[in-house]
Image: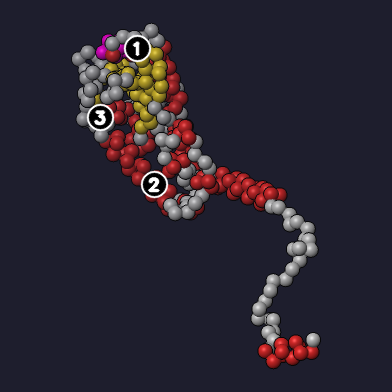
Amino acid sequence: MSRSDRKKERAERREARRERRKKDPMYLEARKVLLNQIELDSDGHFITTEQLRIPLWGAADGENRTRFLGVSRAAYFYTSKLDHTKAVFRAGKAMGNIGRGINLRCRRDAVACLVKTYIFYPVVLIFYENEDDQLTLAGYTPRTFSAAFALRLSIRKFEKAAEDILEKSGSEPGVRDKLREKRYRRRNAKYSDEDYKNPDDEITEDDLIPEDDSKSGSSKDKNIKKGSSSRSRRDEEARSKSFEGFADEKEKEEEPEPADATEDDTYEPFDSDEFEWASDDEEIQSIDEN
């Protein structure tokens, strides 16, 4: 892949991520909280507002980072012995011990809070049940080098507060998983040999392998491996060459040696063209002489 293709692919990925986030209402509402577009609700919780708020004492903690660099997100999945509705309600009670609660406009059945760590930037935690009926905790914080530490610290606080309710079962792929997957794809693209694929009418070494009678139901096309790596191809070629050399030596050993020639076998075939027939006068003359 050329450099221009890589740049184009990165631009397409960024555009797809931007479009996906525009369709995520929880992401947009968490971004408003980090941009300090909030006010106090009647129950003392934060609630977002459409007004652009600029306090006299300056921007909120992490507001400029959020505005210019964006938001980092992490999500974890949990299981609970309780009903999911009760688990979400109990998790909302536990969130009151680690931060200020947030009333979400986009989703009333979810609970959220704003956690301040005093070392890193603030984190917005949202706990809800997703479309796949999984209990999910999503964390949002300004995009910085220390975003992973801020998210992990806040999520650990939540897990400690709700340890008698929830149990972690997994997480969404993070930056490390995405880098590992990208490296794996790049390595596969490097060793893929599209140019060495055989046409359908060409016989390969896989066609010479006898099929197992127990697997008679499987078709021949399933046994042929397309696009094998160059290393395995070299091993197969070396193995086929050694097999051909062994077969040639076997044929030479089985070939019978010629037997010794005898007197009966030493004869020349009769050739009528080389033999000269005598005429009638010559035969009569030879008889008279005798």
Q: Residue at x 75, y 56 (%)?
A: 259
C-alpha span from label 2 to label 3: 26 Å
Numbered label attached to residue 25: 3
Between residue 84 and residue 258, name the one nearer to us: 258
C-alpha span from label 3 to label 1: 26 Å
C-alpha span from label 1 to label 2: 40 Å
Amino acid type, callout 1: Ser
From which residue to which does the magenta span run?
85-92
Tag 3's secondary structure?
Answer: helix
User: Where's residue 136, x and y in %?
Assistant: 33, 21
Q: To which residue does mark 2 refer?
A: 9
Between residue 60 and residue 130, name the one nearer to us: 130
Amino acid type, callout 3: Pro
Q: Residue at x 40, y 18 (%)?
A: 169
Residue 84 seen from this side: yes
Amino acid type, callout 2: Glu
For disc 3, the neighbor class at 10 Å (few under 14, some 14 to 19, many from 20) is some
For disc 2, the neighbor class at 10 Å (few under 14, some 14 to 19, many from 20) is few
Give the mark, 3 or 1, whose residue is nearer the N terminus.
3
Q: To which residue does mark 1 refer?
A: 80
Magenta span: predominant SS is helix
Between residue 232 and residue 124, name the one nearer to us: 232
